Image: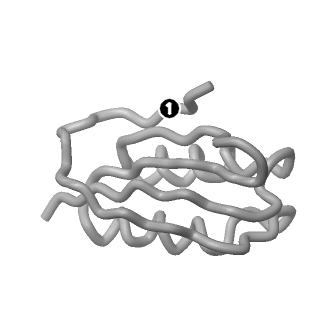
């Protein structure tokens, strides 16, 4: 089953390699979507793919790289759009 999650991660997530961490894991798991910095102390991402893999990406967001401090992860589940690649938005 396909799933899509729109995620906003809050905490010490800028300047610590958070986007690169997400990008690496998403590409490794063949997840589609994107990641970007979203204002002060926030990273926003969309993950689309097999449900269990999207759920795994959400769990990884709750941990982040060892250099980050995650305070909150807000997840909004959406209808899949058929995306097929993952990229960093600027």
- Residue 12 higher or lower than 28, as above or below: below
Residue at 48% in and 50% down: 26
- Measured as percent of width and height from the top left, residue 89 is found at 56, 29
Residue placed furthest toward the top: 90
- Quadrant location, the N terminus: bottom left
Q: Residue visible at 28% across and 55% down?
A: 4
- Where on the picture, by quarter, is residue 52? bottom left
Residue indicated by mark 1:
87
Q: Is residue 70 left or right of residue 84?
A: right
Give the colouring mode of the picture: one colour
Tell which residue pokes out farthest to the left in this image. Answer: 1
Residue 58, how many percent across, how many down?
Answer: 48, 68
Residue visible at 86% across and 45% down?
15
Front in this rendered view, residue 36 or 60: 36
Q: Position of residue 7 (x, y in %)?
A: 48, 58
Q: Which residue is at the front of the view, 47 or 71?
A: 71
Quadrant containing the C terminus in the rendered view: top right
- Tally the marks: 1
The relative height of residue 38 versus residue 90 in the rendered view (above or below) is below
Q: Going by the image, does 46 lie left or right of 68?
A: left
Residue at disc 1, secondary structure: strand
Query: In the rendered image, which quarter is residue 8 located in?
Result: bottom right
Answer few, some or many: residues within 10 Å of disc 1's Cα (few below 14, many 20 plus, some between 14 and 19). Answer: some
- Nearest to the observer: residue 78 or residue 27: 78
**Left or right: 48, with 63 as reference point:** left
């Amino acid at each position: 089953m396909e799933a899509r999650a729109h995620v906003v991660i809050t905490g010490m997530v800028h300047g610590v390699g958070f986007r690169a961490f997400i990008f690496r894991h998403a590409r490794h798991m063949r997840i589609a979507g994107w990641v970007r910095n979203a204002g002060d102390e926030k990273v926003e991402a969309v993950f689309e793919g097999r449900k269990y893999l999207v759920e795994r990406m959400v769990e990884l967001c709750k941990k982040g790289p060892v250099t980050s401090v995650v305070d909150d992860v807000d997840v909004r589940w959406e209808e899949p759009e058929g995306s097929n690649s993952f990229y960093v938005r600027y």
